Image (cartoon, rainbow, N blue to C red):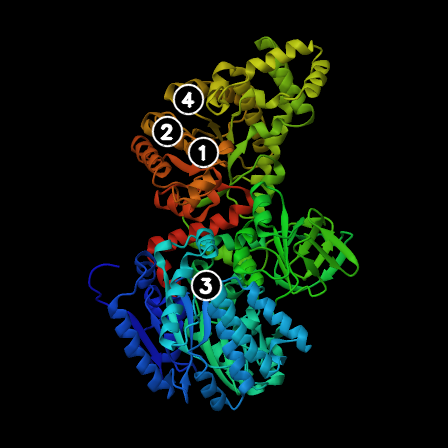
Amino acid sequence: MTGPYTQPLVYFFGQGRADGTAAMKEILGGKGAGLAEMTTIGIPVPPGFTIASSLCNHYIESNQFPKRLRVEVENTLQRLETATGKHFGDGDNPLLVSVRSGAAVSMPGMMETILNLGLNDITVEGLTRQSDNPRFAWDSYRRFVQMYGSVVFALSKRPFDHLLEEARQRCGAGRDIDLPLDEVQALVRKFKEVIRAETGREFPDDPVRQLWGAIAAVFESWNTRRAIDYRKLHDIPDSMGTAVNVVAMVFGNLGEDSGTGVTFSRDPSTGERTLYGEFLLNAQGEDVVSGSRTPLPIAALRDTLPHAYQELERVARTLERHFRDLQDMEFTIERGVLYMLQTRRGQRSGQAAVQVACDMVDEGLISEEEAVARIPPNDLDQLLHSTIDPTSRLDLLTTGLPASPGAACGTAVFDADRAEQMGRAGQPAILVRRETSPDDFHGMVLAKAILTARGGMTSHAAVVARGMGKPCVAGAQDLQVDEKANRFSVNGRSIGEGDWITVDGSTGKVFAGQAALVTPEPSGNFLRLMQWADRIRQLRVRVNADTPADAHRGRDFGAEGIGLCRTEHMFFDGERLSAMREMIVAPDTAGRERALAKLLPMQRADFEAIFRAMEGYPVTIRLLDPPLHEFLPHEEPETAALAVELDMPVEHLQTLIDRLQEVNPMLGLRGCRLGIVYPEITAMQVRAIFEAACTVASRKGRVMPEVMIPLTASVVEFRKQAFIVRQVAEEVFRERQITVPFLLGTMIELPRACVTADELAREAQFFSFGTNDLTQTTWGLSRDDAGRFLPHYLEQGVIEADPFQVLDQAGVGKLIQLACDLGRKTRNDLKLGICGEHGGEPGSVAFCDRLGMNYVSCSPFRVPIARLASAQAALAARGTMDRTRATV
């Protein structure tokens, strides 16, 4: 950071006053803003201060703190001493603090935390006298040295965990808190010896040195691999940085009248309006989330500490009303008194997101527009995930906690790197671990589901899986996981790497083998949300559908027509493929026409069924696009069998196949070029389209065909194909004595088509942007080969996102905008849309809305996502999105 500081660097909160507010997340981070706001509205929060997030990247780049920061921290630390009545480093009445991260966007578990900071051989005696509990004081000291060694000295946790496990076994202690005092004191000494042996440095006894070491470590944790991976997945900018929160310690490990926990104000899996979380008595926060002890459900707190539970319920309702959203809260109970350590917008499943939004509209907390605006469109994908077919015969292995809904099948893997490797290869894997840690994040991203033997509903595995919408079963305690042997055993059975298992995150059940899965049907609040979105949006949403089944599914999801019907997909099986191959190898036009005559009734029947499914909504049918060699066999046995079927010498057939091969088929004889070289193909397809349309129309059905000519580079190509389309259409209308209105347009897939769009628009009535091929031809790369290097481009920051997943607005987007502008200057009623998979990607949908397109088109299961994204784009255009998202 350069230049003079015009803003404070440190912000205090405590005693009912705070220097910050909830609106200052960019400065204080989400955690710091939440602590400040809770303090101001009277929620019981231990006092502390927040160091601004702007210092994070400054420290990472320069490896030093500004002098002014040291002065502000020293002054604010004195305010903290006054607020608590304790003194930092004092041997009689020591002030201890926690040091925690907190970015503007929640990144749960991705960065570092240190508790009990300020302890040394002198202050631990003061804590003993304060608490009248030496066992507690030394256990806190042990925890602090262990965390400091792992976080600040960056040591592996293994030697500390090994020493702790040895002590438990030696004493027969089931839990850390059962260790006798002398063992805990010995562990403190041994932990310090580990630090000395591993680093050659002494553990710092000076609390001030401890504090600055912790602050530096929290800033540095912004750039750990897990944090970087998380930011990539959630599109969080590296420049954001994390704030540092220094908060006076309150202790949940003082005895059975103390405890700590995590709770949501509503169930984050279902949205039910009840507290949902877990807690442990006589514990600190790390015990709950680490999985080292099995926590209790939050409802049990009502019986063990009823007053604290009632206060927690009151606080949860207060925070929900204040922030008008589901809250994710951390708390500690110290000798029966509740303290809130954090509140933030709770991450939730797609099901819960819809349920909570609709309930809050009914409760008068938010408007319908706010409900639409606050649900990430991709979260809807979770509502459409598979579940286990109830008629399946299942082989139950075990039952754990239903940590994240949905079902998935895959082969068991026991290592995050292996899960990542299989995921990138397109092989379904289920990551099985004793318990996950943030270091497993990269494997969790690409696994189909997660299964853990330890941990609860708010463990790392559960929280991360819910955030990604992946099924997760946590805390399956019967599971004996041997990660070294890549195997787990349960109830006398053994499952190794490569064995199929099925995980049901909605019930917590784990099955051997590959269960049958079924697709859910949208209903209830999901339909309400979609109705609200439909009233708001301007952009229409169509479906990419090649079969009547796809068309019906698209309509079920609310599609308003078909934006792309790929006719070639109708030819790839059975009699159709045989007739197609016969046409390809025919030596002359007459032979091709005989083969095409066999295809005509098949195509006509398909189109008729698709038109009926769309019930009068527009259907854009793309004429044959792929090169002909794709329909021919590639292996010798298949070639020999086809030669017999076609009654021709195999050598002759092989010569024909070889002749059709192309060095670069993506840019070869395909699209409109096929129709120009073989006009009889275009004629057959167009006849099938219009005969089907006339049949539906003659039976009082509504039909609206749109014929799309693919891969057009010049207006002359379009004219030649358009002439055939119009000529055949007129023939069919005369034969059937009925006329069906239709549109004739082109698919824009080439940069030349974009820059000459004004010429094309003189002839074409609509443009549909094929963003998949347009991305390939603009970038000069192949989707099939780019997977070899695009991951490296992403890792090295060459590109921010895969251009085949997120539309490249700076490059491809400029060509699209140019084509839109040129086309509408020539034809002001030109219909515009996109039909690549970008049509279901929220950022790309927003881009299309800004350009004033008429529609986007995407696969059936992306249709609801596009509908919601379109509504959010309309709200953004009104300037209401930022206001509706202004929650912690």
Q: Are marks 3 and 1 in contact (CB under 8 Å)?
A: no
Q: Nearer the viewer, mark 4 or mark 2?
A: 2
Residue at mark 2 to residue at mark 3: CA–CA distance: 58 Å
Q: CA distance from mark 2 to mark 1?
A: 11 Å
* Amino acid bearing label 4: Phe
Q: Which residue occupies 53% across, 48% down?
A: 558
The answer to whether any part of residue 818 appears in the image is yes
Badge 4 or badge 1: first in the primary sequence: 4
Q: Horizontal and vertical percent for residue 392?
A: 76, 51
Q: Which residue is mark 3?
A: 199
SS at mark 4? helix
- First of labels 4, 2 by sequence position: 4
Q: Mark 2 — residue?
A: 751
Residue type indicated by callout 1: Gly
Q: Residue furthest left?
A: 4
Closer to viewer: mark 3 or mark 1? 3
Which residue is under mark 1?
770
Q: Position of residue 848 (x, y in %)?
A: 39, 43
Which residue position holds label 4? 718
Sequence-wise, which precedes: disc 4 or disc 3?
3
Q: Identity of the amino acid at label 2?
A: Pro
